[in-house]
Amino acid sequence: MREILGRRRRLGRRGGSARLDAALTCATEWRWPVLPGAGLCGDGARGRRCACPDPECAVPGAHPFDPGLLAATTDARMVRWWWTNRPAAPVLLATGGRAPCALSLPAVAGARALTALDRAGLRLGPVVAAPTRWALLVAPYTLERLGELLYAQDRVPSSLRFHGEGGYVVLPPSEIGTGQVRWERAPERTPDAHPKGAAPAAPWLPDVEAVLDALVEASTSAPDGGSRLTH
């Protein structure tokens, strides 16, 4: 029993270190504002309840709670303090502004969309895969521009969600109520021409217009409509 508990503690420390490393990379190298998610409590690796006060939380662990979304930062000291005190907390990216935005859709539809985009020869940016939903990170967009693009669509299914200003996305290697979050497409850094010793360039991101049609089509044809809120 001691051996099993010791192994769990070591795995927990490594997982916490990985989340801290991921949060620091986002915040300090890529200048993406991050904050810890609510996280999980209780026993078991899957299906644990959210650490927030809502016993019926629809997105266990996968949302801001304390601190709130407005606390998202690129400050290394704050990031270290958060994940030192809460090593298991999910890593949340606050979208919009100068940070990436995202479009998310049901996992089955996401896989279908990626196949279509690859077939078209389109270069994709990072793709986040949670067990039930995938999210494609895109270059920042304004609500006005997004509105214009959506107005040109015949139909936009409710299963396709947009994460812009005031939104967030859960990043790997977080664990949430439905399971582990991973990279389906890992971030690729854009080669930069900065002098040696300068901060690395942030990952390359496609324009939202380039991926929107494929995501709308894939979401429309999702087997169950994918309208559930769960991540």
Image (tube, rainbow, N blue to C red):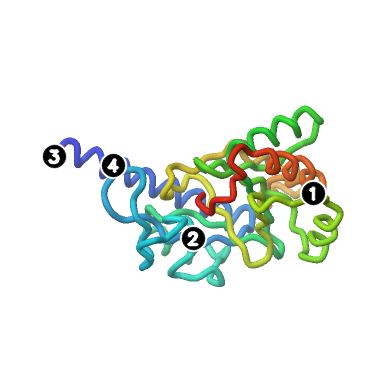
Residue at 34% x, 50% y is: 48
Residue denoted by label 1? 207
Q: Residue furthest front?
A: 224
- What separation in Å lies between label 2 and label 3 (alpha carbons)? 34 Å
Question: Which numbered mark, 3 or 1, is in the foreground of this view?
Answer: 1
Residue 36 image offset from top left, x and y in percent: 46, 60
Residue denoted by label 3? 2
Q: Is residue 205 visible?
A: yes
Residue 27 image offset from top left, x and y in percent: 57, 58
Front-lying residue, 15 or 180: 180
Residue at 80% x, 30% y is: 121
Q: Which of the numbered marks, if any, corresponds to residue 63? A: 2
Q: Tag 3 or tag 2, which sits nearer the N-term?
A: 3
The image quadrant that residue 179 belongs to is top left
Front-lying residue, 94 or 216: 216
Residue denoted by label 4? 10
Amino acid type at image mark 2:
His
* Horizontal arrangement in the rendering, residue 219 relative to residue 53 (left or right): right
Quadrant assignment for the N terminus: top left
Amino acid type at image mark 4:
Arg
Q: Tag 2 or tag 4, which sits nearer the N-term?
A: 4
Would you say the residues marked 4 and 2 are in contact, meaning their CB atoms lie under 8 Å apart?
Answer: no
Amino acid type at image mark 1:
Asp
* Horizontal arrangement in the rendering, residue 72 relative to residue 197 (left or right): left
